[in-house]
Amino acid sequence: MSAMPGPSLLYVGDNGAGTTSRDRADALEQIGAVVTRLPPPALSGLAARIDWQLRARLQIGPVIARANAELIRAAAERTYDVLWIDKGWMIRPATLAAIRSRVGAVVLFNNDNPWGEHERGLWRLHLGLVPLVDEIMTPKYSVVRNYERAGARRVSVVDFGFAPARHFMPDQPLPMLHDISFIGTALKDGGGIRPHRTELMLDLAKRMPGRVSLFGHGWSRAVRGHEQLFRVIADGAWDDAYRQTICASRISVSFITKDNWEELSHRAFEITACGGLLLAERASRLEQSFRDEHEAVFFTGVDDLADKAARLLADEPCRARIAQAGWVRAQSSGYDNASRLAEAIGRSPLLRSLFPGSSAAAPGAKVEG
């Protein structure tokens, strides 16, 4: 007997290297959806920089115009059971209203926070979509009430996860090239330096010169004048390079973006899934996911970060034991993206009937905000 087909799903979101949006689209395919991807149009050079400023400050520009035109065209060509909009800061409410009869359920997934200081100015179109969609999914309990006050019909919480096809332990251990690494941008999406992580990594490098490596946009600018303190300052690491950098690091650091009201980070699950040793900024929901000093190590402030980094670097057996236990926890606890989304869909009165077998995920579901 052949398996029941999953829903046809039009996925509007970034499909670029290293994006969690692409990982979610992959996960939806893994749990049965027939996914058609509609990434935003790409520009390059000066045109891309100008367009980004227009999008970030005014929510206008050629990329937004083309993204909306392509969504209208895709919906005109055929109907879909589900329209899944990731982040939704480029889709106009008028566009969604125009195609509403061509799609069934409409989901708006947002892993960021329209009400915090992070990425301010980018959320006008997103907030206009809120009353029009059937369900909003977010990894943050802290924004549930805000979404409800903004007119959301239903809000559900979906924890961050990892992508098994990209985040996995190598067959053979890699040479350790870095003592302490951090992979992630130094820049705010709306422009400027992220002060919290920059101050912590710079203070750490001053205490442990030559032992910290940075990978991500903006770090050369963020630590200008202090380059000699760092082992590596690189523009970024994505996909294979991302995984290999984690596996070639004795310690991998993860931060909580406080102005984004984060309660946990996707990077923590990716690091442990790769078999890396996670040294993460303390957060309550992250501590519920990994046991401190057994499956990960948590820090509060730069003094704690430096003390624990020094202790771990001096104790290879301890590092290996915690990294292995963290990997086992990530692999055995349903922390992959497909399991996370299947659980949320199993809780959704609107979505679970569209995904064969999704209701099996419901008994383990977390209480919604």
Image (cartoon, rainbow, N blue to C red):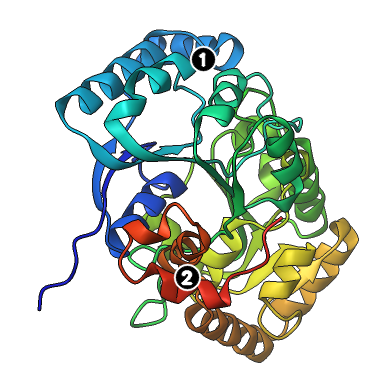
Q: Quadrant of the N terminus?
A: bottom left
Q: Position of residue 105 (x, y in %)?
A: 39, 42
Q: CA distance from mark 2 to mark 1?
A: 36 Å
Q: Which residue is identified by label 1?
A: 55
Is residue 210 found left or right of 135 in the rendered image? right
Q: Residue furthest left?
A: 1
Up-down relation of residue 8 to residue 42 (above or below): below
Q: Which amino acid type corresponds to the residue marked 2 in the rendered image?
A: Cys
Q: Which residue is identified by label 2?
A: 247
Secondary structure type for disc 2: helix
Q: Quadrant of the C terminus?
A: bottom right
Q: Residue at x 46, y 17 (%)?
A: 92
Secondary structure type for disc 1: helix
Up-down relation of residue 63 to residue 221 (above or below): above
Q: Quadrant of residue 353?
A: bottom left
Q: Residue at x 79, y 42 (%)?
A: 196
Q: Position of residue 167 (x, y in %)?
A: 41, 66
Q: Which mark is residue 45?
A: none
Q: Residues within 10 Å of mark 2 (few under 14, many from 20)?
A: many
Q: Residue at x 49, y 56 (%)?
A: 349
Q: Quadrant of residue 300?
A: bottom right
